[in-house]
Image (cartoon, grey):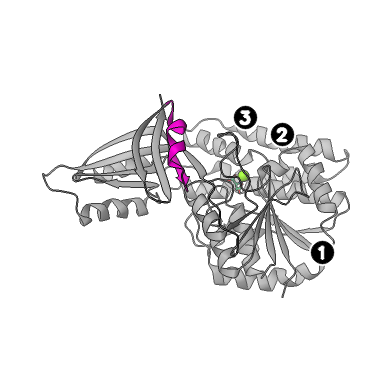
Amino acid sequence: MNRTLHVYKFGGASVKDAAALLNLHTLLQSRLQTNKLIVVSAMGKTTNALEAVLAKKLEQGDFSKEWKQIKDFHIGVCEELFPTAHPVIEKIEQLLDTAQPILDLPISKTNYDEVYDQLICYGELLSSLVVSEYLNFKGLSLAWQDARTVIHTDSDFRFAKIDWEKTRNACQNHWADLLEHQTILTQGFIGIDPLGRTTTLGREGSDFTAAILATSLDAESVTIWKDVPGVLNADPKLFPNTQKFEELRYREAAEMTYFGASVIHPKTIKPLANAGIPLFVKSFLDPEGAGTKIHEHAASHEVPTLVLKKSQVLVSFKVTDFTFIEEKHIHAIYEKLKELKLRANMLQLSAITVSLVVDTQLFKLEQLVESLKSSFEIRYNEDLELLTILKPKTAEIPALMEGYVVLLEQTTRTTYQAVRRKK
Ligand code: ASP
Ligand code: MG
């Protein structure tokens, strides 16, 4: 049993350039006395860049420029960090060559999700290659491992679901012993389906990978290293005067992520809570700082938490046959949402209308409208934001809404939600 195992997850910002990797080395140097399991995501904005390649490919355009930028970026970082003779650049080139058959695949709406996963995984593959080469070059001995040897999923491309039993067995069989002797470095976000095809766990899914591995290997803790001092009560890029939580309960953290707080991936909390493994969120810029500890026994607090979700669509479904909204209408809409893997971020019912707020996703809105337009009169508004306030202080709400048009609003004792657009 690896009861002393600690899992570290480093996101894109912590490995975004040569300076970030220097910092990462310093951070790890004093922390690898005991073996760790390190999970890295793609460097900087690489996943977005790979999505741009796919977007070009989908419109039959020439994506060679976008592809070259990804290659040049990784090589550029390495040129700053390694001596000229180091084999890392050759390894990057070899790795990228293996993507050629995927780049050559025809792509359409029907196979988009599958091709997406086969290509998008290169962000994590490149990152883990560069990071492990660099840390080993600096004298930290780490074993690079392919996450696809242990993270087993179904074939639901882009949103793959974990096969927990298979994953746990694979972790125990392939990694548990290795971790007795060495630190492992692996990729977040990616897995493998029963047919051996790469899958991904949803954008920003590397946090979830860390939680999956921690529970499957009975780890002692998980630490997510970020560019913020811990979990704040709002995104400091969007709101002034944020406050850091010293500690939070699993349930509170899960709720924040449910409403769209991007500090931790929404699926991360549940497995850790079930296993009673504490989650630390710390700053890689201030590694000695206390960060935030998420666990079962955190003290309660009354600090309002603000979560803003952008790129939202408000869709309203109106019955057209002079009936009222009934269970069967809601059922039909929810069935379709499920099929499209969309979630209602907010829901409101009136006598003749169901209104709901969903994320903007390629092709999804048109499919939703198309399949339900025979039963409802459907209208939608795009480019909206959804503001959720947990433990709201009612008196503070009007000031937050200044300069916005509110399209839909809901208040309960513990939660305030508004869909809004800038005036
Ligand atoms: N690189 C992936 C993404 O950007 C996964 C992650 O960062 O956690 O979505
Ligand atoms: Mg990321």
The C terminus, quarter of image: top left
**Dot in front, 2 or 1:** 1
Tell me what residue is drawn at x 54 percent, y 47 percent: 303
Instruction: Give the SS element for disc 1.
Output: loop
First along the sequence among labels 1 and 3 = 1
Q: What stretch is highlighted in magenta?
A: 387-403
Q: CB of residue at label 1: within 8 Å of ligand 1?
A: no
Q: Which of marks 3 and 2 is nearer the N terminus?
A: 3
Residue beneath disc 3: 65
Disc 1 and disc 3: Cα gap in Å? Answer: 43 Å
Q: Is residue 277 left or right of residue 158?
A: right
Whether residue 3 appears in magenta in the rendering, the answer is no
Label 2: element kind: helix
> Residue 378's x, y, as percent?
25, 39
* Residue on which disc 1 sits: 34
Q: Where is residue 142 in the image (x, y as percent from the top left)?
A: 80, 58
150 or 224: which is nearer to us? Answer: 224
Q: Which of marks 1 and 3 is in front?
A: 1
Residue tagged by mark 2? 72
Query: Is 401 included in the stretch rendered in magenta?
Result: yes
Q: Residue at x 54, y 49 (%)?
A: 117
Outermost residue toward the bottom in this view: 1
| Three-letter residue code for mark 3 | Lys
Asked which secondary structure carries label 3, the reply is helix
